[in-house]
Amino acid sequence: MNLLLLFDEDFLPDGTARLTGRRAQHAREVLRAEPGESLRVGRLGGLTGSGEVLENSPGVLHLRVSLTEPPPPRAGIDLLLAIPRPKALKKVLPAVASLGVDRIVLVNAARVEKSYFDSKVLDGAFVRDLLLQGLEQARDTRLPEVLVRERFRPFVEDELDSVFPTDAVRLLPHPPATQPLRQVAAAPGQRSVLAIGPDGGWVSFEAQLLESHGFRPFSLGPRILRVETAVPVLVGQVALLGEDTAPRHDAGGT
């Protein structure tokens, strides 16, 4: 845990923060923070800074908080992801939160097992906890938005343009393609949407439908990667190609 995240309900009327549960336990048993020491903290959705330890007793961490620094810049990337195996999803969600992805749509696909949608991993509280772990790792404070859609075609045809900014570059890693990512990637400062299929890949109909809605196919190279590997690799490559000093728009394109 590289950042203690603070929630609105943690703050007392005098501006200090009182933490309990997992975070307090971590500060006491792992960080072994003593009164007077400073910890790196951030307010969920807001600034980061430091927290001076006033009390660190069993089950309670009391901090005097100073929040003065912005969180890391956004990657300018959204993700359309065919829902992976639950064990893989537990790895993917913290990773994309760490990498600064703004919006994730978990969608059904022909090669997705229908039982995946019954997994406890998709429970809202479970998803939030995984995302928070990613923020703590990356010293970030801004949660990605996660949407779940059980019907692929209706989502692409009816919702895609309202969920993802229409001026974003839409990218489709797909094995039959031959052109590399750098030939289809967004210009510096422009948003991107990545459509990543399941371990078996998008079937032809799905790939064609995505292409008809503006997704540009490209090759990942000769190696076949599992989803939990492909997602951070691709997000990292797209973010690197899109780096510049231009300000990033929010997930809604504003």
Image (cartoon, rainbow, N blue to C red):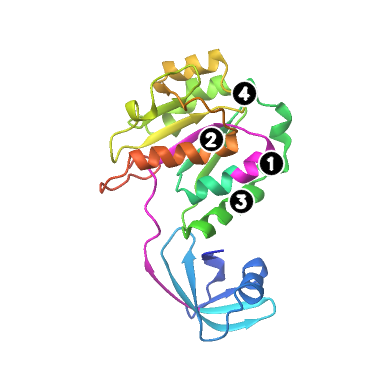
Q: Earlier in the sequence, mark 1 or mark 4?
A: 1
Q: Nearer the viewer, residue 221 or 227?
A: 221
Inspect the image, locate mark 2, and give the three-letter code of the amino acid beneath it.
Ala
Residue named by callout 3: 130
Structural distance between the alpha carbons of marks 4 and 3 = 25 Å
* Residue drawn at (57%, 51%) of the image: 131
Residue 203 sits above or below residue 91 on the image: above
Q: Residues within 10 Å of mark 3 (few under 14, many from 20)?
A: some
> Given contact means CB atoms under 8 Å apart, are the residues at marks 1 and 3 in contact?
no
User: Which image quarter is the C terminus in?
Assistant: top left
First to last magenta residue range: 64-91
Residue 159 sits above or below residue 61 on the image: above
Q: Nearer the viewer, mark 3 or mark 2?
A: 2
> Given contact means CB atoms under 8 Å apart, are the residues at marks 1 and 2 in contact?
no
Q: Which mark is residue 72?
A: none
Residue named by callout 4: 200
Helix, strand or loop at mark 1: helix
Residue named by callout 2: 230
* Residue drawn at (54%, 53%) of the image: 134
Helix, strand or loop at mark 4: loop
Structural distance between the alpha carbons of marks 1 and 3 = 12 Å
Structural distance between the alpha carbons of marks 1 and 2 = 15 Å
Q: Nearer the viewer, mark 4 or mark 3?
A: 4
Structural distance between the alpha carbons of marks 3 and 2 = 18 Å
Q: Position of residue 119 (x, y in %)?
A: 72, 39
Q: Earlier in the sequence, mark 1 or mark 2?
A: 1
Q: Position of residue 186 (x, y in %)?
A: 32, 33
Residue named by callout 1: 87
Helix, strand or loop at mark 2: helix
Left-right relation of 252 to 2: left
Q: Residues within 10 Å of mark 4 (few under 14, many from 20)?
A: few
